[in-house]
Image (spheres, rainbow, N blue to C red):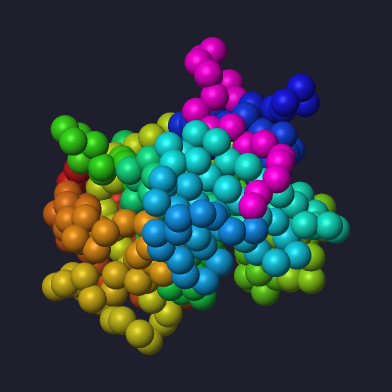
Amino acid sequence: MNNAVDFRLCGLRVRSDLALSDLPAWDGDGRPADLTIRLGLVPDRLTDIAAEGGLLQVAVDGHCRFAIPDVAAYLLSPDATTLTVAPAAGATVAEIQAFLFGSVFTMVSLRRGWLPLHACCVRVGGHAVAFAGASGAGKSTLAAGLMSRGFSVLADDQTVVELRPDGGPWVQPSFPRIKLWRDALDRLGQPVDGLARVRRGLEKYSLPVGAAFHDQALPLRHLYLLVRPGDGGPVTPLAALSHLPSLLSYPRLLALLLPQDRLMEQMFRLAGACGGIRLLERPETERQWQDLLDLLQAGAAAS
C-alpha cells in the first residue's frame, strides 16, 4: 500500500488505501496500524457460513462479508485488523465511506469488544453524555445545536463505548463531522455551499466539526433516549430495556454478531454505570433548550 495514509478513528491507527475525508490524520505514536483498509477482491460468497442475514455473511472462522449493491463489498478479518474493500464500478469514495463508517464499522466495533450505540455524544465537564434514538429522532440536530452552544462533540450518530473491566464505560471519539439533512441545516442557519453530500442524490450533507471535536476518550456518565416532541414528556427513567433497538447501531446486524445474553449483560452494565437510561424529548423551543442545558449543568455539578 504505497499510497496508504494513516488516520485516527476511535483511538485506532487506521491505514487506508482510500482517502477517508471523514477522518483526521493520525498524529499519535509510531505503533503499527490497528486497522488496515485495503482495496482488493472480495468473494461473492464465503465458505462455511455460520450466520447470514440481509447483506451480511459470517463465516465459521469469523470472517464477515458485507455488501451494498452498486457501492462496494467489504470483507473483515476475524480479528478486525484488516478490511478489504472491493468498490463497484462507478461508486464514489463518499458512497463507499458512508457504508464503511456505518454498518461496516459496527462490525469492527463488535469484533473489538466495543458496544456501538445509535447515539450522538458530547462532552459535559470531564465526562461524556450520550443521546441515543431511532432514525429521525433528531440526534444529529441535537449534536449540532449543542455544538453551537459551546459543547464539544465526540460522535454524531454512532457512539462507540468501551466497557473497561476496571473503569466502567468509556466513549471513544469517532468522526469530526455531523451529518445533517438540508432542512436541519436551514433551521440552523447553516448554508450548504461548500459542504459535501453524504451520498449522491441525497439532500444530506457532512458538516465539519472542526475545533469543537473532542478527540480523547471520556467516561460515559449519562445516557438518554431521545424521542420526538410529544412522544415523551419530562425526563423519565426507563424501567427496562424495552427500547433496546433504538439504543443500538444496526440491531439486526448486531444480532448476528453478538449473542443475545452477552448483549443484555453489556447493556445492563452500561445502564447501571450511567445511573439508568432516561427518556428525553428533543428540545424545540428556547425554553426547552434552556431546560436541557440546566439538566446537563446539574449533572456535571453532581459528577
Residue 104 vs 16, above or below: the answer is below
Q: Residue at x 64, y 52 (%)?
A: 43
Residue 286 coordinates in the image, percent (x, y): 46, 70
Residue 238 coordinates in the image, percent (x, y): 19, 72
When asked about the image quadrant of residue 265, the answer is bottom left
**Range of residues picked out in magenta:** 26-43
Q: Is residue 233 magenta?
A: no
Q: Residue at x 41, y 69 (%)?
A: 252
Residue found farthest to the bottom: 230
Residue found farthest to the top: 30
Decide whether the magenta segment is chiefly helix, strand or loop.
loop
Residue found farthest to the right: 90
Q: Residue at x 62, y 37 (%)?
A: 37
Residue 187 vs 6, above or below: the answer is below
Q: Residue at x 41, y 45 (%)?
A: 61
> Front-most of 203 and 211?
203
Residue 271 vs 38, above or below: the answer is below
The N terminus: image quadrant: top right
> In the image, is 45 to the left or to the right of 170?
right
> Front-most of 303 and 3?
3
Q: Is residue 54 visible?
A: yes
The C terminus: image quadrant: top left
> Front-most of 210 and 276?
276
